[in-house]
């Protein structure tokens, strides 16, 4: 695949690492204003570093945009004359809708939105995808790219804001739960480093049980709880204190906030 990443910041670098380590590229162009920030990619076979977006577009078929939202429109205007019928545009820019992109480059282009999360840096991103009419014909291509960096799911565009809360903001929510578990383990007698190891890997194990067994969480909970046992007593106390309702309310609040932010504020 001939790929360009326009705007190789933190997210762009994570995508680039995944594409390079999984041998997904024929050529890879990485653009950034200051190339010293991406010097780690210099010397890789097939990888070109450049400050010139036009050069990257001309030499690539798949264009992954990972720029700041406030810069995206100007970049699309800049590269519009260079787009050909085979170009696939993949945007990772939060809040920048497909109709807005179509209004700039035309609705005849293959346009896809991708919403990964920061776990893409370790190949464990949950990435949500959607496309315009033509872009739907290239969703499988986007899946092939982002499945190398985790897991993908195709959703309607009107769910992308919600997906941002569940999957992108969700990383922070889960980190806070892991942190709370760590603090509890310290209070119960473990050293801080040990406590975090216990919390992290127990969380990973819980997720993998659901991924592997495809069970409902309550089915796995039932395997752990016994009559008058310590687990059910702890769960009930957490629910009395509002664990589930607090998490749900927090996510709904984040969703309301993201829908109130204008694109130039993101």
Image (cartoon, helix red, strand yellow):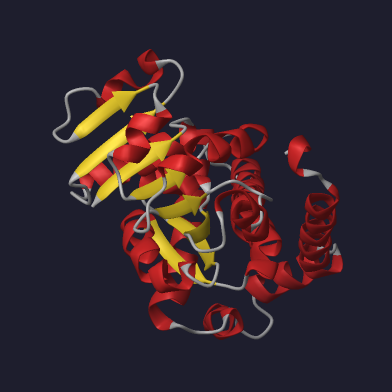
When the figure is inspected, residue 22 is found, relative to residue 79, above or below; the finding is: below
Instruction: Tally the numbered discs.
Output: 0
Q: Residue furthest front?
A: 81
- Residue 251: horizontal and vertical position, in percent? 76, 59
- Residue 131: horizontal and vertical position, in percent? 53, 66
Task: Say which residue appears at 43% left-offset and 24% top-offset.
Answer: 32
Task: Say which residue appears at 40% left-offset and 46% top-offset.
Answer: 63
| Side (left or right) of 178 relative to 109 | right
- Residue 157: horizontal and vertical position, in percent? 64, 67
Task: Say which residue appears at 84% left-offset and 64% top-offset.
Answer: 242
| Side (left or right) of 261 relative to 12 | right
When the figure is inspected, residue 52 is found, relative to residue 155, above or below; the finding is: above
Task: Say which residue appears at 37% left-offset and 46% top-offset.
Answer: 122
| Side (left or right) of 40 relative to 200 | left
Q: Residue furthest left?
A: 45
- Closer-to-camera residue (238/43): 43
- Closer-to-camera residue (13/219): 13
Kindly tell me whether residue 177 is visible in this rendering. no
| Side (left or right) of 116 relative to 179 | left
- Residue 256: horizontal and vertical position, in percent? 85, 57
Kindly tell me whether residue 49 is visible in this rendering. yes
Q: Quadrant of the C terminus?
A: top right
């Amino acid at each position: 695949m001939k790929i360009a990443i326009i705007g190789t910041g933190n997210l762009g670098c994570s995508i680039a690492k995944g594409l390079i380590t999984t041998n997904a590229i024929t050529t890879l162009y990485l653009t950034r204003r200051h190339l010293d920030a991406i010097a780690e990619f210099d010397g890789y076979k097939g990888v070109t570093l450049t400050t010139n977006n036009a050069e990257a577009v001309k030499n690539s078929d798949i264009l992954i945009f990972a720029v700041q939202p406030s810069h995206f429109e100007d970049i699309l205007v800049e590269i519009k004359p260079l787009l050909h019928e085979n170009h696939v545009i993949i945007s990772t820019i939060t809040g920048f809708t497909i109709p807005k992109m179509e209004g700039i480059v035309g609705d005849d282009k293959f346009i896809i939105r991708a919403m990964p999360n920061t776990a893409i840096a370790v190949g464990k991103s949950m990435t949500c995808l959607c496309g315009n009419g033509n872009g739907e014909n290239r969703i499988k291509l986007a899946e092939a790219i982002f499945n190398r960096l985790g897991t993908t799911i195709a959703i309607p565009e009107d769910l992308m804001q919600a997906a941002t809360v569940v999957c992108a903001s969700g990383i922070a929510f889960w980190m806070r739960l892991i942190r709370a578990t760590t603090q509890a383990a310290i209070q119960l007698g473990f050293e801080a480093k040990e406590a975090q190891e216990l919390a992290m890997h127990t969380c990973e194990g819980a997720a993998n049980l659901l991924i592997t067994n495809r069970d409902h969480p309550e089915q796995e909970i039932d395997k752990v709880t016994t009559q008058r046992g310590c687990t059910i007593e702890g769960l009930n106390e957490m629910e009395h204190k509002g664990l589930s309702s607090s998490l749900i309310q927090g996510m709904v609040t984040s969703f309301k906030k993201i829908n109130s932010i204008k694109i130039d504020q993101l």
